[in-house]
Amino acid sequence: MLKAEIALRDLSCAPEWRDGVLSLGASWIRPHAHAALETLFAHTQGQWIFVVRERHAGMPSREDDAHTTLDAKAFDELHRACLLWPLDYVMIEVAQAGHRIKLRSGMYGAAPVYCRSTTDALSVSWDLADFLAAPASIDFDIASVFLAQGSPYSAQTILSGVTLLTERAVIFAEPGKARYHYPAAVETGARSTASTFDGDADDAFEKLLHGVVSARPAEGERIAVELSGGMDSATVACALTSAFGKVASKGILLSGEERQPQVARREKIGQRLGLLDDTVDIDAYLPTLDLQPGERKVYPHAELYLEAFDRLWGAARSEGRELLFTGVGGDELFPTYQDEAEAASTGSELVEQARHHATRLLTPRAQAAVRASRMFDAPASPIPVSSLLASTCQAPHLLRHGLWPVNPLSDPRLVAFCHRLPHAGRHRRGAMRRYLGRHLGADVFPPDYAKETFARVLPDLISRHEKQLAAQLRECALADHGLVDHGAALALLKEVAATRGDASAAPLIAFLWLERFVRQLA
Amino acid sequence: MNTLEAKIEGAVEESNPFAIQMDGPMQKDAVTGALEMKPMGFPQDARWYYSGG
């Protein structure tokens, strides 16, 4: 949520806060300007802190402290309070003597920053694309894992020398030295052994969820919610209308057999909650499969349906919406523990098949990189790692649109509560299902409700564009990097075009998106 | 407050339930001279040297 270019020698200069930028010598720190964020700048003799953080409805703003020099005790207290801020933040701390700087992140990872540290400078940005202007090379290990259908959440990124400030992590830099500190692991999966929550669980779920959305100071007219028509986004929409009244909803409509039930369910939700609904057809905004670099920088871990979301996010912003609430995190909110194993999930079989296809795509060297232990991934987090990764994918796009992402179903307090629920509260998302029944009526999500999915979109699209893709893949950047077997890539394309299978399409999609990313590197 | 509320409030109010790294502000003074390893280009010299200050 900030960008900075800092020459470490400038850290001894007196910082000056003017026109939304903190300047020190030729260096600068620019917070992301957004109504959902506040900036705090406080100093004491020889030291200062600069914090960009989400505003909290129940906590007073401290923005006026910018003009105050605090004594050591007050500075210490403010420092501690900033570390424990209950929503997301990025904090910079500087000790002028020795030109030392610390950069740290809160536990939400909603819009994480990337950093490049050299012997005498530190560059920081929430947009990975900012690091593509200079010559860059890809990290072989991360690229291999990505192609093998892995999703590492790690300080290590796809670009060598560019570090992701993962949730609660700290980077320390001084001239000639830099180091990265991961936080302690947090295990939230300690379920309740007693039945303490029985009976009261539904009330508690509602109270916590409403508390989470109400923590953001906002009015209904500034809020939009992504509404797919599924349980997760519907739950968030219910909580938002309870807290803020009428809000806008945005959704992408599928084609084929799924369309009619999706439209019918969305209409019921919209009518019963009084949502101001807006949709686009996925067929009108299909993802581009052009592998040639365009003007717009692309990311490997990208939102796949960016064209459709771009249209919705643009519309939301032009209506004056500033906060975008999503259902991210809903899938991870009600885990099944090992001794409760229900019918084997077909999802895991699909993943295994996809990994099998992916392995055939990789060179022996890349396969070896995938098999190596990942010793430097981030430790267990209060927020499920898939939610953190989803935030990493979406955030740069949303911030560029002037929207701030909020994922209430990933809130660490709600996650901790739901993971501790007894089996009845978690089974088939019991607490969420009953919440929806109370707010929408039981007919919207019947027990046999089938979740809609984008799974068909890309296999069908790839099949239709096989010839163009094969022509563009006569040369293959990832093969040149020694990551991918060129012949195997072309064979996988042929297979997906013929079968349109989910399991074979997944590694092909990862390959195509990474190929496009690598082609744009200088 | 019933048991349930106490449980929820407790989870919310614990001082640092999610293990934020709680170090204090950085030390204000920087050491200007320190013992450092001799650069590897000069292995024939003494192993340690004082960098001044």
Image (cartoon, helix red, strand yellow):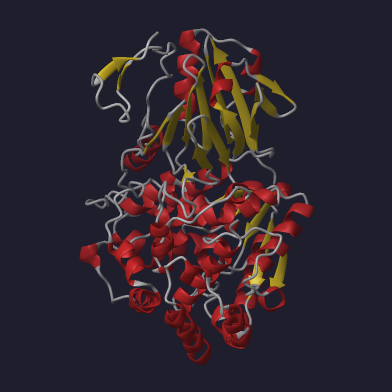
The percent position of residue A5, horizontal first and vertical second, equals 61, 33
The percent position of residue B27, horizontal first and vertical second, equals 41, 15
Q: Is A266 above or below relative to A466?
A: above
Q: Is A486 above or below relative to B14?
A: below
Q: Residue furthest bottom?
A: A498
- From the viewer's side, name the closer residue of A316 and A100: A100
Using the rendered view, name the quadrant where residue A184 is placed: top left
The percent position of residue A121, horizontal first and vertical second, equals 54, 31
Q: Is A45 above or below relative to A213?
A: above
The percent position of residue B2, horizontal first and vertical second, equals 35, 39
Residue sitting at x 23%, y 63%: A338
Taking the image as shown, residue A300 lies to the left or right of residue A423, namely: right
Taking the image as shown, residue A301 lies to the left or right of residue A65, namely: left
- From the viewer's side, name the closer residue of B38 and A198: B38
- From the viewer's side, name the closer residue of A166 and A60: A166
Q: Quadrant of the N terminus of chain B?
A: top left
Q: Is residue A333 visible?
A: no
